[in-house]
Structures are given as C-alpha cells and as structure tokens.
Amino acid sequence: MTAGLAKHLGLLAGAEPPIVAEFTGRLDGAGLAVRARYVGSGVNRDYLVNLVMDEPCECARHSLPSYRHVPSAVADERGTAAGDVAVVLTDLPALWGMLTPRRAQYRFAAWVRQELTLPPAGAPWVLPRAVEREAARLARRHEYSLDFVTDDDSVRRFYGELYRPYVLARFGNGAIVVAEEDFARAARGCTLARLHEHGRWAAGMLLERSGAELRFRWFGASRSPPPDGASEVLDVACIRRAHADGVRTVLLGHSRPSLADGVVRYKQKLGARLRAVRYPQPMLGIAVDRGHRPMLERLNGRQLITVRGGLVRVLEAS
C-alpha cells in the first residue's frame, strides 16, 4: 500500500482508535455550567468543544477499541446537577458518520470550501470595487510589494520561516502542520506568492494551477496575527494575476461551516460561493440534552451550515 493510499484510508476510516473525553466549562452569557462528552477521532475536538463552552477543561479521557463502540460511549450518560447543560459531541471519519447520534440537533461536515468565479479576460473589475480599493490603500500604507517565484529554496524557506511557525502560533494545540517533505512534494509545479513589508518577507501563499482553475493552498506569515492587511493585499494580487493568466475559477480553500466565521465572511466579501468539499469529510454532531434553550441559542447564533447540491442550509434548533 502506498503512503498516499494509506493516508486517504486513514481519513476515511480513522487512522487511530477513537477517544472519549469529558469536559467542563461555562456558558458565560447564561451563567451556567456545561458538561460535554466528546467521542471521536480527536481531529476536530478543540473546534467542537469551543463551540459549546467557554473556559473548557478536560477532566477525563480514555480510548475505545474501535468506532463500533461509539454508540455505547455516546449513550453512557452521567447525571448533571439541576440547571447544568449536558452536551454530546461526535467527530467521526466519513465511513463512520452514520453513527452520529440521531438525537443530535446539529449534524454537519467539518469543513466547507469557497470558490470564486472570475469574469472573462478583459473585464476591468475582477473583484468588488470596494475590495480592490481597500487592498490598494493597505498596500500603499504599509509599503507592501509582491513577487511570484517557483524555486525550491524559496519554498523550503517559506515552510520553515513562515508557514510552520504561523500555523503553530495561530492554532496552538489544534494545529495541523503538513510534514516538510509532503509540503515540498505538493509544492512541485506550484507558484509561491510572496508579500514583502518594507522589503522584508511578511507573508506568502502557495498557488496551484490546473487548467482554468487556481487553488489557494497554504498560507504563512511572519507573525500571528499577520501584518495588517497582508492577507487582503496578497489575495487580491493573486486573484488579479490569475485573471490575467486566463483562470476562471479560484478555489479559496477550506473554512469552518459557519456563516458567523470570520474567514467565511471575508471570502464572501470577495464574492466567493460556498460549496461542499470535494472529498469525504468527517461528520460532526452536537446533541444538547433536554433541548436546553441557552445552549441552542448559542449554537443557533453560530449559524452552522450544511451544503448539499450547491444549496446552503443554516442549522437551527429550538
């Protein structure tokens, strides 16, 4: 079995046995205690836990022999004090997604993608005018400049000095960093966009071209959060260059499935449409005991979504 095939099978079926973790936290707006049980691969644990509670604290953890034991782990309820909120969180690989509890008020894929359709060559405005004007203003204010390179040395420097440190700084314990050799292999044939601030390399993004389609791959920056306006200036420059080169569709990468998510809102400002990710995604579930209204109001406010057949549906429960 090749390494690539093993990786894809791991994503589909789960590379490691699932875990069960117990969390306690607060529902700050309602002044309530929250207890959550997480059952799943561990990949999206922090994301789910932070959706349902503030100041989370893991108080217990153990592994399950296999995903076949998920239903019994989900059903193993423990009592809560009167007024407390109990939540069950599931995070299951695609092939085990059918084990998401039926009582889960929220069932959704872990990620969505956003894509931008570009106008035919020669169009004077590629992006909304307000977006392009703001990017130009930021570039002037911070003396940003850009260039595009393809050499291996620049790619490896980007990985070591910008991409890896940035991902670790931004996501902490939840960071998923691509291994350097996998990164270098995927970068072959790609273009690296570099943004410079007063002559110093401040941010970059790897771009992958396939026919009339351009994919935004990995982003990195010299610090987290990135320099002011760096992402906007870089994105606009890459999109305008793609349009000039005959690209008709730009894949802007994956985002969390929430209309309240800042990344989703930013990409929509560019004119991007929400689409389902092209390969099977982990299935996430949130089951709120007793339909506890303050928790449902919190989750409804996140505007979690599913995308099927090109249609976006906002998940709400009452």
Image (tube, helix red, strand yellow):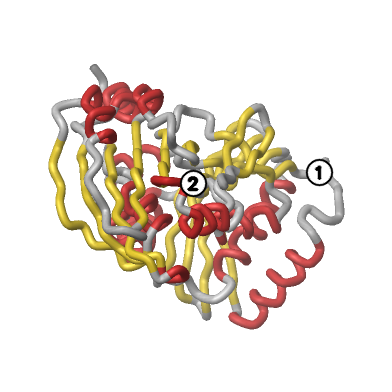
Task: Determine the secondary structure under disc 2.
Answer: strand
Rendering coords of residue 263 (x, y %)? 56, 57
| Inter-mark Cα distance, 1 to 2 | 22 Å
Q: Nearer the viewer, residue 70 or 208?
A: 70
> Which one is in front, 64 or 193?
64
Looking at the picture, which amino acid does disc 2 mark? Arg
- Against 1, residue 78 (above or below) is below
At x 70%, y 58%, the residue is 269
- Label 1 neighbour load within 10 Å: few <14, some 14-19, many 20+: some
What type is the residue that disc 1 sits on?
A: Pro
Residue appearing at x 35%, y 43% in the figure: 89
Q: Could you tell me if residue 112 is visible in this image? A: yes
The disc at residue 217 is 2
Q: How many marks?
A: 2
Does 128 sit above or below residue 181?
below
Quarter of the view holding residue 77: top left
Residue at figure coordinates x 34%, y 51% from the top left: 86
* Left-right relation of 99 to 111: left
Residue placed most toward the observer, 101 or 144? 101
Question: Can the viewer see residue 189 in this picture?
Answer: no
Q: Which residue is mark 1?
A: 119
In the picture, measured across the screen, residue 3 lies left or right of residue 207, that is left
Looking at the image, is 164 positioned above or below residue 198?
A: above
